[in-house]
Amino acid sequence: MSTVLSDPAGFIRNNTAIAQAALVPEISLHLATEITPIWQASEAYLEQIGIEPPFWAFAWPGSQLIARFILDNPRHVRGRRVLDVACGCGLAAIAAALSGASEVQANDIDPMALEATALNARLNSVTIAPVSGDLIGTLPDCDLLVIGDVCYNEAMAARIVPWLLECSKTCDVWLCDPGRHYAPSMPLEVLTRQTVPVTQELESADRRTTTLFRLRDISAPD
């Protein structure tokens, strides 16, 4: 059995450093940095040891802006049940828990992301319930669904956006996107927009103009 499968938490601790995302310095996370082994790890190496590309080891611009907006506007989550889909490192979920959400769940199809989220939740003394598996096609039982950085290819956007619109019939839905080509082209309510510092290694840029949208089912009454 690989090191990852036998001790996922140990693998994360040994291959990341405790750091803070540029936009959310209040929250500490286990992240890949230039000094950590996983920063330089090739996909071939990761496949050999049995894990997917470590999206959970980075604070992506969408999750940073969701977290920043929540921390600055806690009334949007206070007392509400929040679900962070495609949670990655769990940054948005942690911000919701710190801001008074009554219950916070984090979902990802990668079990390593849920392990990283659990470690990061402990770092910040909050409780987050993990939800594994692909939720697309279901109607989650929550008051607010948040999701970021998922419109990175056509196939993913084609699956996720219609599902999010369906979810918006039963809960509030926020989608955060850093200007990906396959982001929704329909008019959407903008909650906030901000330039987020990013790394050349991940984004081929130093900054990304990132927008937090509220998705609304256009057939529903205002």
Image: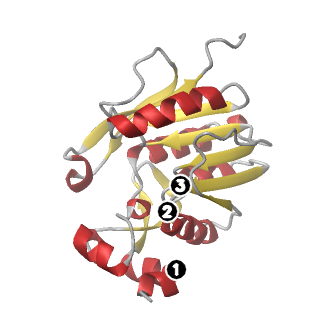
Residue drawn 48% across the image and 47% down it: 63
Earlier residue among tags 1 and 3: 1
Looking at the rendered structure, the kind of residue marked 2 is Asp
Give the distance between the C-alpha atoms of the residues marked 3 and 2, in whole angstroms: 16 Å
Left or right, 152 with respect to 112, comes to left
Give x and y (percent) for residue 75. Answer: 72, 36
Distance CA(mark 1)–CA(mark 3): 17 Å
Mark nearer the N terminus (2 vs 1): 1
Residue nearer the viewer, 135 or 198: 135
| Circle 1 residue | 9
User: Is residue 131 placed above or below 99 in the rendered structure?
Assistant: below
**Secondary structure type for disc 3:** helix
Tell me the residue that label 2 is attached to. Answer: 110
Q: Which residue is mark 3?
A: 91
**At 41% across and 40% down in the image, what residue appears?**
156
First of labels 3, 2 by sequence position:
3
Measured as percent of width and height from the top left, residue 66 is found at 52, 41
Amino acid type of the residue that numbered disc 3 sits on in the rendered structure? Leu
Q: Quadrant of the N terminus?
A: bottom left
* Image location (x, y in percent) of residue 62: 44, 42
Residue 42 is at least partly visible in this image: no
**Rendered view: 43 above or below 65:** below
| Circles 2, 1 touching at the beta carbon (< 8 Å) | no
At label 1, the amino acid type is Ala
- For the C terminus, the image quarter is top right
The Cα–Cα distance between marks 2 and 1, rounded to whole angstroms, is 14 Å
Residue 104 sits above or below residue 125 on the image: above
Which one is in front in this view, the residue at disc 2 or the one at disc 1? 2
Q: Quadrant of residue 98?
A: bottom right
